[in-house]
Image (cartoon, helix red, strand yellow):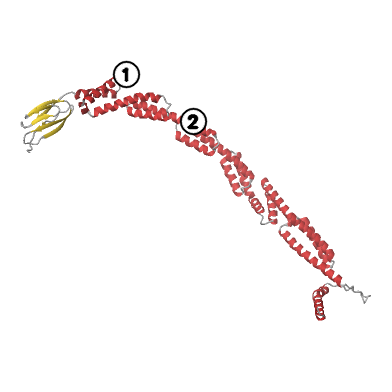
């Protein structure tokens, strides 16, 4: 670096010093003029450049401390410090005032000391804000639990001032504001509960919790009232179920027991009641079915009675009475069926095998009647079957007419030859008669001889030539 550059650098340094130091020196008087009529030439103190620089440094430090103090002071003031840290806050303000006075007296070092003390107190207050917030929230919740509206709201206001965005503080504020109405509903609920008006009490507790679902006294009381109501409704339904069961109203009883089960699934008494209901219902159905079967037997509806006995055995295979009754009902039902079949098709008796079976059937009916169990239906069956058997063997005169030229044959009976009119005796049944004549087409006539009826004449002649 040459001499010219060194000279230029020194000039620039001097310019910077004059620009920054000199105005401050001028602003900060280094001496004061004291009026003294006697002394006309007062001594003016002179400061060295190093003293000027040191004084300037202390003033800047004071200003920096003041900037921090003002920021922290305003922040704490906005957070309601006068409510929860008033004493220390006022002390810090007093220290600030002392520092300000020292600053104005240009006693910067002493001002700095006061500012530092004030800042430490403010920082201590800021550090204690979290603990104060926690304590306010805790005390506020305790006041709510105790029903102290004034204290709860005071603590809530303190908490919300310290931390407006804090969720717990916000919740505490809301709960404290709704506490008067919560307590009103809670007191009403308690009065209803003491009067035994449990439904009204439950409603009031629910209204209180609708405003504050964390209000523990209402929660606890509602749980107790709900349990009492549940037990009351449970017992009411069980009593209704037993009453319906005694009246054999099984579906209504089941509905009541199941409703009770939905209220308290842990109750063993419901399962026992349902089991007893099924047993009672089954016994009732068995008794009713046995009564119905006995009625059917009296009405001699043996097939229907047999079906009832089969249903009972299927319902409970251990039942003895239905099994015993089924034997007789089965026999009588079978005899009824056979008798009805014969009586409905009397011409079947023309068959020898069927006639013999009908005879055996009649003997069986007579055997039953001889055991002192004769009834109107049995008597009618015996009477009708006896008559039918007799009529089936009684011949009926049948008139046959012809032209005197046709050969007539009663198939499987006899050859009747040529005639103009002939009477034959035939037992009831179905017959076929054949007519034949030379040069004419044969004719075949089928006819039935009914029991107990007058048969019209049968005309047999060959009239169609070949």
Question: Tag 1's secondary structure?
Answer: helix
Q: Is residue 183 above or below residue 451?
A: below
Label annotation for residue 372: 1
Which quadrant of the figure contains the N terminus?
A: bottom right
Residue at x 50% of width, y 32% of height = 273
| Residue found at the very far front of the displayed protein | 1
Residue 452 at what x, y percent from top left?
A: 18, 26
Residue 233 at what x, y percent from top left?
A: 54, 37
Residue at x 34% of width, y 23% of height = 328
| Image position of 11 (left or right of 162) | right
User: Badge 2 local density, few (<14 within 10 Å), some, or many (20+)?
Assistant: few
Residue 401 visible to the viewer: no
Nearest the eye: 207 or 93: 93
Residue 259 at what x, y percent from top left?
A: 50, 38
Q: Is residue 229 above or below residue 111?
A: above
Nearest the eye: 285 or 101: 285
Label annotation for residue 193: none
Picture quadrant where residue 187 is located: top right
Question: Tag 2's secondary structure?
Answer: helix
Nearest the eye: 167 or 307: 307
The residue to which callout 2 is attached is: 276
Q: Is residue 234 above or below residue 175?
A: above
């Amino acid at each position: 670096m040459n001499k010219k550059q060194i000279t230029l650098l020194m000039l620039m340094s001097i310019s910077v010093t004059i620009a920054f130091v000199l105005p401050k020196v001028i602003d900060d008087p280094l001496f004061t003029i004291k009026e003294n009529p006697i002394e006309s030439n007062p001594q003016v103190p002179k400061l060295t450049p190093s003293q000027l620089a040191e004084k300037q440094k202390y003033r800047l430090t004071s200003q920096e401390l003041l900037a921090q103090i003002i920021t922290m002071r305003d922040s704490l003031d906005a957070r309601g410090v006068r409510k929860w840290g008033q004493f220390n806050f006022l002390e810090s303000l007093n220290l600030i005032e002392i520092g300000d006075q020292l600053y104005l007296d240009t006693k910067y070092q002493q001002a700095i000391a006061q500012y530092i003390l004030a800042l430490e107190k403010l920082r201590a207050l800021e550090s204690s804000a979290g603990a104060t917030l926690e304590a306010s929230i805790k005390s506020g919740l305790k006041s709510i639990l105790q029903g102290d509206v004034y204290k709860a709201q005071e603590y809530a206001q303190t908490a919300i001032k310290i931390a407006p965005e804090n969720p717990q503080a916000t919740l505490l504020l809301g709960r404290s504001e709704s506490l008067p109405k919560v307590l009103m509903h809670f007191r009403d609920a308690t009065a209803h509960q003491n009067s035994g008006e449990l439904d009204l009490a439950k409603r009031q507790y629910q209204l209180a919790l609708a405003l504050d679902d964390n209000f523990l006294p209402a929660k606890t009381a509602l749980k107790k009232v709900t349990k009492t109501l549940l037990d009351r409704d449970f017992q009411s339904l069980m009593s209704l179920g037993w009453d319906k069961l005694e009246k054999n109203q099984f579906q209504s009883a089941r509905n009541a027991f199941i409703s009770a089960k939905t209220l308290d699934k842990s109750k063993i008494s419901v399962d026992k009641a349902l089991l007893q209901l099924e047993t009672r219902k089954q016994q009732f159905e068995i008794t009713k079915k046995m009564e119905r079967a006995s009625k059917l037997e009296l009405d001699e509806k043996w097939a229907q009675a047999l079906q009832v006995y089969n249903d009972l055995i299927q319902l409970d295979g251990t039942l003895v009475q239905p099994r015993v009754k089924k034997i007789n009902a089965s026999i009588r039902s079978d005899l009824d069926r056979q008798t009805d079949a014969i009586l409905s098709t009397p011409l079947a008796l023309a068959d020898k095998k069927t006639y013999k079976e009908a005879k055996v059937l009649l003997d069986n009916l007579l055997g039953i009647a001889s055991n002192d169990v004769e009834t109107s239906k049995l008597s009618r069956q015996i009477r009708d079957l006896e008559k039918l058997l007799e009529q089936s063997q009684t011949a009926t005169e049948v008139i046959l007419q012809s032209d005197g030229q046709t050969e007539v044959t009663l198939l499987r009976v006899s050859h009747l030859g040529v005639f103009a009119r002939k009477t034959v005796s035939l037992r009831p049944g179905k017959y076929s008669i054949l007519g034949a004549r030379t040069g004419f087409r044969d004719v075949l006539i089928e006819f039935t001889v009914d029991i107990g009826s007058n048969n019209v004449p049968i005309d047999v002649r060959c009239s169609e030539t070949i």
